[in-house]
Image: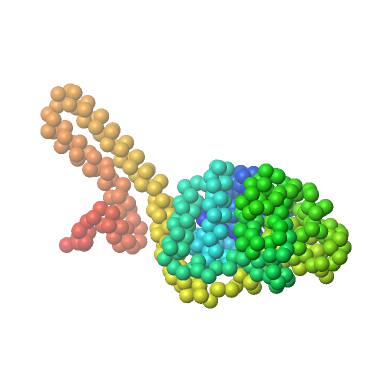
Amino acid sequence: MALFTLGINHRMAPLAVREQVAFHAEELRRALTDLTSGGRVHEAAILSTCNRTELYCQADAPQGALQWLEHYRRVPHHAIEPYLYTHPDREAVRHVFRVASGLDSMVLGEPQILGQMKEAVRIAREAGTLGATLNKLFQNSFAVAKDVRSTTAIGTNIVSMAAAAVRLAERIFEHIAGQRVLFIGAGEMIELCATHFAAQQPKQIVIANRTIDRGRGLADRFGATAIRLEDVGERLAEFDIVVSCTASQLPIIGLGLVERAIRARRHRPIFMVDLAVPRDVEVEVGELDDVFLYTVDDLAQVVESGLESRQSAVLDAEAIVAARVDRFLLWLQTRETVPVIRSLRDTAERTRRHEMEHALKLLAKGEDPATVLDQLSHRLTNKFLHSPTQALNQAEGDRSELQALATRLFHLHPDAHSGE
């Protein structure tokens, strides 16, 4: 049984490819159930963020998971195969530890990925696809992330995606304080962005969400107002800054809608940040003269700020990861011997019970207890040693390896089988 990671991320694939294989939380349980049906994958968890989609699996081979992904997402093999990576066994463990620690993120050392991974694990557990191996893997991942964050400087001077959005907005508008800001969605990323933009005290903040109560809950934290998502079309022209991150599978802001808003604004610019994967804003919107549209990939250059000061911490973090990988693999190897150990003990126990029953029958007949105990010990010794003795006697070719193994298993004296 192999452990592997199959994935696609911001390093390997552009946004246009990543959004084809993205999953939203609402569909993950169904997807996991489908992935593990039929026995092709025995354990599975799926992590899907704006920068990556990764399948963590225990299975006989990764081909089944790859074929499932292509079929489930209706993506031709040739469309994603050049961008996919597969990490088996040790590399899979190392990769998961690095992801949890923020070492594989667009923003080096960012902490948000750890929360996203914990959520992916929670969903897999509820779906019943998280077995003992993956559960142990992820618990170790969380421990590694904690060690990396608490003992290295990997998390210092981080420029988050939310902070990068503010920096970009400041390039368009000299002062955010005079601008009206619209946030579309009410998830974690929008909450982070709202926190950063609210610190600049904009003229107005509005939260648009499908569920108005959830939108109001977030709006109340920032002294903002909430509107329904369907009202965005009528009110888009009011806003100078629009930040969107929803779970929609299709764009919710189309070219025609933005064109009408620009005309109503008399061509005053709109700054738009689309943090959703798949995208919330149609690609063609970015071609309009009065729109400054940025996606998650466009923010990469900004989030590189402060990277040099954290690079020295990477070596320390990688050393922690390497050590914990070895520990996990040792546990995995030990776990592989459990069935053999259990079978060995079961066989010994059956032999013990059989000989005890035989001895008790002799005692019941009135035979001498000392003689019965002596026979019991001889019979147990002979039965326990019969198989290893037979294996040694019938060994073909070089017996030295088998003899050395027997010496180690039974703690024999090194010269016990020398013949001297």
Residue lying at 30% horizontally and 50% vertically, measured from the top left: 388
Apparent side of residue 5 relative to residue 420 in the rendered image (left or right): right
Front residue of 213 and 325: 213
Q: Residue 355 at what x, y percent from top left? A: 25, 34
Front residue of 129 and 401: 129
| Relative vertical location of residue 61 with respect to residue 378 in this rendering, above or below | below
Residue 288 is drawn in which quadrant?
bottom right
Front residue of 402 and 75: 75
| Relative vertical location of residue 272 with respect to residue 71 in this rendering, above or below | below
Residue 194 is drawn in which quadrant?
bottom right
> Can residue 92 be seen from the camera position used here?
no
Front residue of 338 and 218: 218
Q: Residue 81 at what x, y percent from top left? A: 67, 63
Count of marks placed on residues:
0
> Can residue 384 be seen from the camera position used here?
yes
Q: How is the image coloured?
A: rainbow
Given the current orientation, which residue lies at the most extreme bottom position?
A: 308
Apparent side of residue 195 relative to residue 242 in the rendered image (left or right): left
Q: Residue 29 at what x, y percent from top left? A: 62, 45
Residue 407 is drawn in which quadrant?
bottom left
Q: Residue 218 at what x, y percent from top left? A: 64, 50
Apparent side of residue 370 relative to residue 229 in the rendered image (left or right): left
Residue lying at 83% horizontally and 70% vertically, measured from the top left: 289
